[in-house]
Amino acid sequence: MNSQFNQQQAFQGKQPAPAPQAAYQYEYAMGFPYGYPSVPVPVSGELVDDKPEDYIPDVVKQYLAYFKAKVVEKDVPVILELYKTEFNKLSIRWFREYPWPEAEKIEEYADKDEAFLFLYKELHYRHIYAMHKPTLEQRIDSYYMYCSLFEFILHRDDPLDLELPNQWLWDIIDEFLYQYGQFVQFRSNLKQRSSSEIELLKDNPNVWDIHSVMNILYSLVEKSFINKQLEVFQSGGDPAEVAGTFGSCSLYKNLGYFSLIGLLRLHCQLGDYYQALQSAKNVQLSKKVLANTRVPASQISLHYHVGFSYFMIRRYQDTVRIFSNIVAYIQKAKQHFPPESYQLKQVIKQNDQMLNLLSIVLTLFPQHVDEAVNSQLKDPKFSEKMAKMQKGDRKTYEDIFQMACPKFILPGPPDFDLLPDNWSKEAGVQQCSVFMEEIDDLLLLPNIRSYLRFYTAMPISKLAAFMEMDDIEMRTLLLRFKHKMKAIQCSQPLGPMSGESQSSSEIDFYIDGDMVHIADTKVARRYGDFFIRQIHKFNSTLGSAPTGVLA
């Protein structure tokens, strides 16, 4: 098997070549050259023909007809450009104040193509969530839209003859889970709901139900045989042998792959970290996979939720490894996101979340990290927090966790008659309390470690005097330290659930009677990478220097 053929390449299809604008901008659609004709542009707040919600500019009609034609032709590079760039341009130009038209109003421009109309409806509701404030009715309608879309894809005897860019397929799964989370928050915040909204929520108890959301994701996974394909691929076999009819289709294969990441994210938001990792057990996490990814947002989400799950089950070394890899990758990948885009803002936000979680782990269990990551942690917004945590500031730990954790959700509806306070925050409060219980056990570890580092052996009574506590309490703390420093660690880039028990501290010790014997197990810092980077930078400077300057 070709060594360059990795999991990311195998399960995200062929990389589409960039679509030059000249390839489609001047083709004919509905008898007109595709482009932007001189249709009057409404200023903010201005009504177009006094019917803004019914008005469909000619350029939008041409765009929809052309978009539909390219979807039928399976012209993936052009579809990606129309989806990723042109849709946003038209949204900003024509639909800043009002949503895109309902699907029924544009179906004539799409030849009533069923597949395209489903895709348009998904974009329609996504635009409402992104640029407008959705009503409860729209939230309900979007749920039924997704149910119809996935039923259209799944409940078939033969695969749907449709090919879409990987980025769009990921965005469908990502938006589906985002809208579910938004509905849960909306439903839980009863203090801000009107009586009519509460009645409508009561009448629709199954809308955005956790079971239906999970059922869709698991159905996509099973339909694509993606877990079997990943297992065979990791063992060196040919995934096509177990893919089946649907799994051989890129549409189902990629939706299945992204659904695994979606299940990881959903279980993580529910606080079930072991099931979250189990969902992604066949997904590889390595620098090689990152280097070949075609959908950076999916890999960032994958690494963030795997790393956070490790963090919550005390696999701290794996947390550092996962976060270090993805933070270093983000520094290179940020340039590929459009400036000022919501995608870039989300990436920067998750990057800061992971750096904050890293600051917690490295305060409690110091260890070597990549120089690129370490340089970011030296930023005052992280280094100042680390200094406070080293002094045992409990509030700093709590603030960082609340900022860096995912948006936890309670899957069940609240009691609509009691109108509980802060129900929308209850899941986050519960997870934070679990985390702070762990921190309460670890707060004194940095101080204990600082004393142990200066000795090879010392009486427990002496260490107890340093810590200003009695011998029995000190012995208890040492045993707690010994227990907490042991955790499962993955020794190679296998699935998230693999690993073996190892120490997560750079200092090891054992107690013999009333004496503590200390062994420094810290691995010498690796300076090679740093010097190699500086040598390359120096050579680059020499090469770019004007002739005669160094003479």
Image (cartoon, helix red, strand yellow):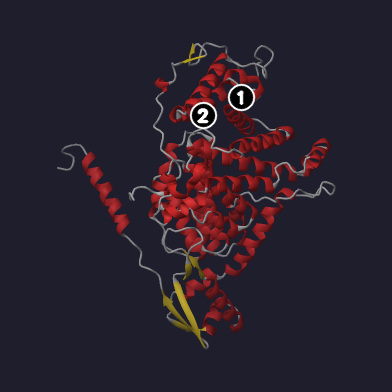
C-alpha span from label 1 to label 2: 17 Å
Task: Please say whether residue 347 is visible from this viewpoint.
Answer: no
User: Would you call the spot at circle 2 few (<14 residues within 10 Å), some (14-19), or many (20 or more)?
Assistant: some
* Image coords of residue 436 (percent x, y): 63, 62
Q: Is residue 423 above or below residue 499?
A: above
| Mark 2 secondary-structure assignment | helix
Where is residue 429, by image quadrant? Answer: bottom right
Which residue does the image show at 52% across and 80% down from the upper left? 463
Q: Nearer the viewer, residue 389 or 24?
A: 24
**How many numbered badges does the structure rendering display?**
2
Considering every residue shown, the one lying at the far bottom of the view is 513
Q: Is residue 128 left or right of residue 332?
A: right
- Residue for badge 1: 96
| Mark 1 secondary-structure assignment | loop
Instruction: Point out the tag, 1 or 2, that comes first from the N-terminus.
Output: 2
* Image coords of residue 354 (percent x, y): 51, 52
Considering every residue shown, the one lying at the far front of the view is 157
Viewport quadrant of the C terminus? top left
Which label number is shown at residue 256? none
Where is residue 368, by image quadrant? Answer: bottom left
Q: Is residue 279 above or below residue 193?
A: below
Task: Please say whether residue 128 is visible from this viewpoint.
Answer: yes
* Image coords of residue 520 (percent x, y): 41, 74
Which residue does the image show at 56% across and 78% down from the upper left? 479
- Residue for badge 2: 83
Which residue does the image show at 56% across and 45% down from the upper left? 223
Kind of residue at disc 1: Arg
* Image coords of residue 451 (percent x, y): 48, 75
Q: Nearer the viewer, residue 187 or 210?
A: 210
Q: Is residue 479 above or below residue 225?
A: below
